[in-house]
Amino acid sequence: MTLRSFLDRLPLVAILRGVTPAEVVPIGQALVAAGFAILEVPLNSPRPLDSIRALSAALGPEILVGAGTVLDPAAVADVAAAGGRIVVMPHGDPAVIAAAKSAGLFCTPGISTPTEGFAALRAGADALKLFPAELLSPRVLKAMLSVFPKGTDFLPVGGITPEGMAEFVAAGAAGFGLGSALYRPGAGAAEVGEKARAFAAAWRALKPAAG
């Protein structure tokens, strides 16, 4: 499987920052029921490896589960051991990217300039996280896409709402990472599922040929 095979189902990454192992499985199941195929537990969440392990076991190989806010190459082995299959980063450290690829994991580093983006691709990145999207407008994305290799997937992350996706999609965004507008600590599965359905509907309205 490729990262694109998961993005093709629904290119929205659920960022579950602050989720706990006790609540993560029903939240994950609600996201999957809404069509989500990629779930990320940031490593600055409570006992994140336990949450990744629980999600991986409950949801199986058809759902891509992994870690976000991966800052250190040494953390990659722990993510892989917990069943994680994707590493998402806020930055573009080539050492973390190399560790992820060596472990057989997908990797989406954070970038905000062409220099960072090209360096990340050279290091083996599978897609690029445009971060923080609050500071990087659709015009910036469009300009980047004009010089990056055809087929490079950019996923804006930061402040994304269902209503705010259209301009980025028009500029060429391949998908999005969704944070606090989708999940906040303490939110239950029903609430997260409702928000997930709204995001999925907004994406499909912009991309009628999608899933």
Image: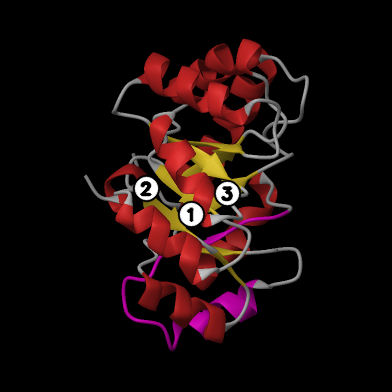
Percent position (x, y) of residue 197? 55, 28
Where 23 falls versus 127 (above or below)? above
Dot 2 or dot 3, earlier in sequence = 2
Residue segment shown in magenta: 138-158
Marks 1 and 3: in contact by CB < 8 Å?
yes
Label 1 SS: loop
Quadrant housing the N terminus: top left
Residue depicted at x 39% and y 30%: 83
- Of residue 108 and residue 29, the one placed in the foreground of this image is 108
For the point 47% across and 58% down, which residue is it? 108
Which residue appears farthest toward the left when viewing the image? 1
Q: Which residue is mark 3?
A: 177
Query: Disc 1 marks which residue?
Result: 175
Residue 7's disc number = 2
- For the rendered model, the colour scheme is secondary structure
**149 vs 130: above or below:** below
User: What is the CA distance from the residue labelled 1 to the residue labelled 2?
Assistant: 8 Å
Q: Secondary structure at mark 3?
A: strand
Which amino acid lies under the numbered mark 1 shown in the image of this protein? Gly
Quadrant including the C terminus: top left
Q: Looking at numbered disc 2 in the image, what kind of residue is underneath it?
A: Leu
